[in-house]
Image: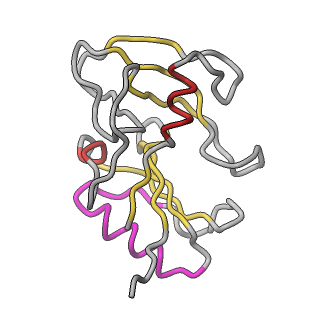
Amino acid sequence: MRYDPLPTDLVRAWRAGGPDANGQAPKRATSDGDGVPCRHCLRDVPQGRDYLILAHRPFGAPQPYAEVGPIFVCAEDCAAWEGDGVPPVLTTSPDYLIKGYSADERIAYGTGAVVAAAGIDAAIAARFDDPRVAFVDVRSARNNCFQTRVRRPTNAA
């Protein structure tokens, strides 16, 4: 499975003061080192480093299932996540909310669940057993903030 970071060009636009999903410029804050997950590098923003707070809608267009919520990204350049397996940002909470979506960005009913961080990879993989599911979004189980999107695995020959 591939855990997708937010696109670098989008993050660069926000860093340059571009508008968020609500049409507002991102707000700047300084990390206390606890619970500030960057959606680009998929790691926590280190203590003392600046980050941006903004509204994000991880969908192509507004529609009833296209949730908007707050996210954080490193204020300075960071490398987009390219690792294998579960990224560090999904190991800092005891659990996460996952939901499967169809290719047309609609919730696949029955796929949502709060799952333990230790079992998140298996829980997401199980969602891909459902042919309706094109991708799974991972959100905070406590604040509903978007964390990352996981794409359906492709069969490589």
Q: How many marks?
A: 0
Q: Is residue 131 left or right of residue 21?
A: left
Instruction: Return the x and y of residue 4 as percentages of the image width and height.
Output: 44, 53
Q: How is the image coloured?
A: secondary structure
Instruction: Return the x and y of residue 42 as percentages of the image width and height.
Output: 34, 41
Q: Quadrant of the C terminus?
A: bottom left
Residue at 41% x, 38% y is 40
Instruction: Return the x and y of residue 78 as percentages of the image width and height.
Output: 34, 31
Using the rendered view, name the quadrant where residue 108 is placed.
bottom right
14 is higher (above) or lower (below) than 27 = below
101 is higher (above) or lower (below) than 33 = below
48 is higher (above) or lower (below) than 83 = above
Instruction: Return the x and y of residue 80 as percentages of the image width and height.
Output: 37, 42
Q: Which residues are magenta?
A: 113-131
Depth order, front residue of 131/48: 48
Using the rendered view, name the quadrant where residue 1 is placed.
bottom left
Q: Is residue 77 magenta?
A: no
Q: Is residue 117 magenta?
A: yes
Q: Is residue 63 left or right of residue 151?
A: right
Q: Is residue 56 left or right of residue 80?
A: right
